[in-house]
Amino acid sequence: MVEVASLFSLCIKSISAQIINGCDGAEELFELPSHFLDGFLDGLLMELPPLALQKLHELHDNFNTAWKILYKKRWPMAIEKMRHTNSIIPDGDVAISRPVDDFVDWRLQDLEKMETGSNIMQDALAMSRSGDGCVDWQQLYWEAHLQSCLDEAAERALLPTSDGHIGGVKISDEIMNYIGHSGNTTQDCLSYHCINFGHYARCLRLQNVLCVAEVCELLTSSKLRVLAFRRIKSKFHVDGVCRLLNQNKESLVSLEFIYCQLSPASWNHICNSVYVGGSEIHWIRHLCINSSFIFESKSSSFPGGLSSFLSSGRSLESLRFCDTQMGPKCAKIIFNTLIESSCGLVTLEISDDEIAGWLSKVDRSPVGFSLSLPPQISLKSLRVLNLRGNNLCKDDAEDLSNALNQMPDLRNMDISDNPIEDDGIRSLIPYFIKAFVKACPISDIKIENCNLSGVAVAELLRSLPTTREPLNSLSIAKNELGSSISAAIMEFLGTSRVRKLNIADIGLGALGFQELENGMQEKVEVAYINISMNRGGIRAAHFISQLISHAPNLVIVNAEANIMPAESLAIIHNALKQSKGKLQHLDLRENYSLCLSKYTAAILEFKFHGEPIVKIPLFPCFGVPYDDDP
Ligand SMILES: *[C@@H]1O[C@H](CO)[C@@H](O)[C@H](O)[C@H]1NC(C)=O
Ligand SMILES: *[C@@H]1O[C@H](CO)[C@@H](O)[C@H](O)[C@H]1NC(C)=O
Ligand SMILES: *[C@@H]1O[C@H](CO)[C@@H](O)[C@H](O)[C@H]1NC(C)=O
Ligand SMILES: *[C@@H]1O[C@H](CO)[C@@H](O)[C@H](O)[C@H]1NC(C)=O
Ligand SMILES: CC(=O)N[C@H]1CO[C@H](CO)[C@@H](O)[C@@H]1O
């Protein structure tokens, strides 16, 4: 067997070398009878290194599957993580009814997003889809390869031994081996990869050292659509950024700045570089500024360039400022600029900043906001508003309830991590009542960690009217609501038919779970529920078991850290045995006594797509022999 394998790999090696260094061998290949060729190609393609496949691709058309396999082979971490967290649905959209293959690709995007802390990979996948929704894996492969080369070059360019000539930076053997390098020394420096694969790149992430004239020249064949810049601080690098923006301004749709420090003058320069056709018009759809210093903290000075960029942004769909040291005055200018420009903004995020007072009517700037604004002046198209972590207090909540009237289409609102307290949430109740019954009702609400009490949240839940469509998601996690909230929660499950509910860490306790059970209705619509960190003990197990039998569409239950005793597993095992539901994931980790139960093995036999549905802690009982007495 070993000899056969090595003979096969020798053949592959020789065929690859022939293909890479001239195409004679490959042309002969295509003269073989087609049924034979197809079988042969299937075997061969899986083994060929990328450089050889690239040459073949130029002769024969569809190798998309082979490119996809190469992609997954080279970046397996994403796949591994994907398998690991396969059934955990993050806070975003629930993928409940997606077909598996689609689901896998979707997870891939999601994981990449988590890994890079940015949207760039998600953008990359979106950009690479053609009209029929298919991913062009060849394009993605070379784009990701170029990204690896650029990242490596950026690292090496920072070493003291670097001579400043970045195109000449050597690419490591590790990367060269991935693509089937044949030992040809003209191919192992950055410039070769930029020149040959640059035209595949649509989305790139660039460290400051790459934002220089030399790299701009190497990338002239690229039509970049998404650019993410890291650590841009000096004027020298701003010049490089501007040149790259200018050379791609016709194709650019998304811009991201992370860990940057940009002066108002730099902003003017940057914004001027994306204007097309001599006028102040740009085609940027997404702008994200993250963990960057761009505002003079607390002062009213606002980069003029950014202001005209916002007001001339006819294509602008999403605007995200996260941890930019923005103060209330700048936030107010942004809000006023947006409300007056006729852009079709869909998403606005200002998070982890300090903008308390930004909507206050006292100290109004020249174009202040007030209720008497004519109705046509509004953020008509805004659907997503994220104001997380801005230290907003109850007065801000009151001002916000007025401002929200200017956002008739809002669907998704996150005001978590702001100490708005009971008075704050009470002043938002009238807004929510209206927002629930309008033509396009609000569908996703997050009010986590807002220092709310059970009394105020019960008032909110009980005042919300029934909507035509079920509510998609509500999170009231991390507020100390106590056990008395349970009755209101169960009533709310009935009236809102909410699909995703997060009530983690709200201090339910055993009594709270008992009350949840008492309020259980015949049929519950919920698909996802997070009840973790509520110290429910055995009552949490009883609640889960009841929920499994009353919620036919239940897909995911997160019940970590509930001090559940060993007997809990018997109760849950029994519920699962009788269930005909769709449960895919039940997380019981962080409850260490559970692994003492005799039901651990039995409960792991319930599976979804080959993976156990129930996640139980293995530590500290890992390795302890299993007692299989009935
Ligand atoms: C900003 O960066 C942080 C850390 O990388 C990340 O968690 C967050 O999602 C980013 N925010 C945006 C709006 O991209
Ligand atoms: C090395 O690669 C370059 C560029 O692809 C090519 O022009 C040259 O002929 C190759 N040399 C050898 C010895 O294969
Ligand atoms: C939470 O609210 C209470 C009273 O409403 C207040 O005394 C307390 O300081 C607040 N805690 C925080 C962290 O804001
Ligand atoms: C459940 O909620 C807790 C608290 O908000 C959070 O830490 C945890 O990540 C959530 N779990 C899932 C799977 O969303
Ligand atoms: C994190 C957590 O809640 N762990 C608990 C799991 O259950 C055991 C006993 O039931 C507790 O001692 C742990 O604190």
Image (cartoon, rainbow, N blue to C red):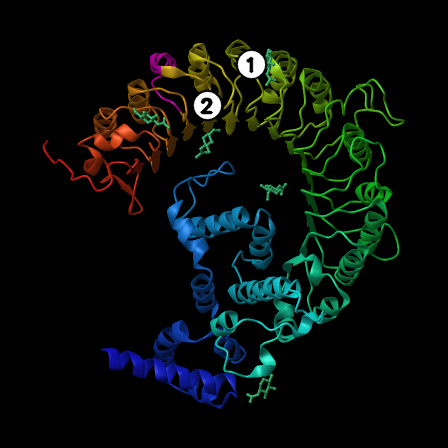
Q: Is disc 1 placed on a helix, strand or loop? A: helix
Give the x, y percent position of residue 436. Answer: 58, 21
What type is the residue that disc 2 sits on? Answer: Ile
Q: Nearer the viewer, residue 371 or 510?
A: 510
Residue beneath the point at 52% across and 15% down: 461
Q: Is residue 107 above or below residue 33?
A: above
To which residue does mark 1 refer? 460
Pick the quarter of the image with the C terminus: top left
The outermost residue toward the left is: 629
Would you say 224 lies left or right of 523 here? right
Point out the tag, 1 or 2, that comes first from the N-terminus.
1
- Does any portion of residue 115 appear in the rendered image? yes
Which image quarter: residue 211? Answer: bottom right
The region drawn magenta spans 510-524
What type is the residue that disc 1 sits on? Answer: Leu
Which image quarter: residue 347? Answer: top right
